[in-house]
Image (spheres, rainbow, N blue to C red):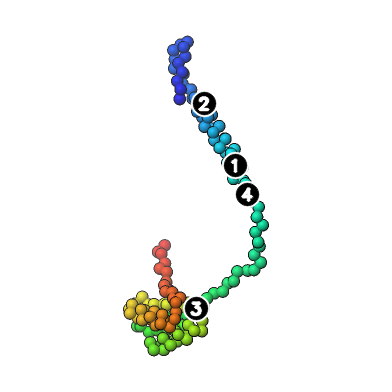
C-alpha cells in the first residue's frame, strides 16, 4: 500500500498501488498462453480393439481343515496322518494349478498346522493359503 502526501492540505492519502498486481496478472496470462497449447497437443493413435472377453477361470481349491482336537479334514472328509500325505500327493498330480487352503482352528496347536504344511510341501504343493475369519467390528 502506497501512501501519497497531498501537497495542498497535508493529509495522507492511502490507496492501493495496482502496478504490482497488474504485473503479476500479465505474467500469469503469458504463462497460461504459452502452456495451454502444449497441454492440448496430442498424438492421434489408432489403438487395437479387444475382440475377446477376458477368461474367468477360477482356480481349483482343495480345503484342508484342522480341527481343535488335531483331526485333519481333507475336503470335509476326516483323514489320518498317513493317508493325508498320500491324498495330498494324488490331488497335486491331478490338479497342478490348484490352491491348498488351510483352515486352522483357533485352538489347534501350531505343531499340527506345521506338520500339515510340511506334508503338503513334500507332496509338491507350492500354492498354499491360510483361511481366516474376519472379526466383525462392533457398531
User: In the image, residue 117 lies at what x, y percent?
Assistant: 39, 79
What residue is shown at x 44% (from left), y 81% (from top)?
124
Residues at marks 3 and 4, CA–CA distance in whole angstroms: 46 Å
Callout 3 secondary element:
loop
Residue bearing the label numbered 4: 42
Callout 1 secondary element:
helix
Residues at marks 3 and 1, CA–CA distance in whole angstroms: 54 Å
- Which residue is nearer to you in this view: 111 or 132? 111
Look at discs 1 and 2 and give the one toward the viewer: 1
User: Is residue 104 rendered to the left or right of residue 96?
Assistant: left
User: In the image, residue 2 lies at what x, y percent?
Assistant: 46, 22
Based on the displayed image, in which of its 4 quarters is residue 105 positioned?
bottom left
Of the numbered discs 3 and 1, the one sitting upstream in the chain is: 1
Residue bearing the label numbered 1: 36
Residue bearing the label numbered 3: 98
For label 1, count other residues whose C-alpha is less than 10 Å away and answer few (under 14), some (14-19) or many (20+). Answer: few
- Mark 2 and 4 residues: CB-CB less than 8 Å, in contact? no
Placement of the N terminus among the 4 image quadrants: top left
Of the numbered discs 3 and 2, the one sitting upstream in the chain is: 2
Of the numbered discs 1 and 4, the one sitting upstream in the chain is: 1
Look at discs 1 and 4 and give the one toward the viewer: 4
Q: Is residue 16 above or below residue 40?
A: above
Amino acid at each position: 500500500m502506497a501512501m501519497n502526501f497531498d501537497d495542498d492540505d497535508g493529509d495522507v492519502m492511502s490507496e492501493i498501488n495496482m502496478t504490482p498486481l497488474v504485473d503479476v496478472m500479465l505474467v500469469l496470462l503469458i504463462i497460461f498462453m504459452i502452456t495451454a497449447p502444449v497441454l492440448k497437443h496430442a498424438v492421434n493413435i489408432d489403438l487395437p480393439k479387444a475382440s475377446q472377453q477376458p477368461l474367468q477361470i477360477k482356480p481349483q481349491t482343495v480345503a484342508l481343515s484342522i480341527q481343535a482336537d488335531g483331526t485333519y479334514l481333507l475336503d470335509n472328509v476326516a483323514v489320518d496322518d498317513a493317508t493325508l500325505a498320500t491324498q495330498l500327493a494324488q490331488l497335486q498330480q491331478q490338479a497342478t494349478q490348484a490352491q491348498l487352503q488351510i483352515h486352522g482352528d483357533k485352538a489347534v496347536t501350531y505343531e499340527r498346522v506345521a506338520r500339515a504344511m510340511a506334508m503338503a510341501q513334500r507332496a509338491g504343493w507350492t500354492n498354499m493359503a491360510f483361511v481366516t475369519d474376519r472379526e466383525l467390528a462392533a457398531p
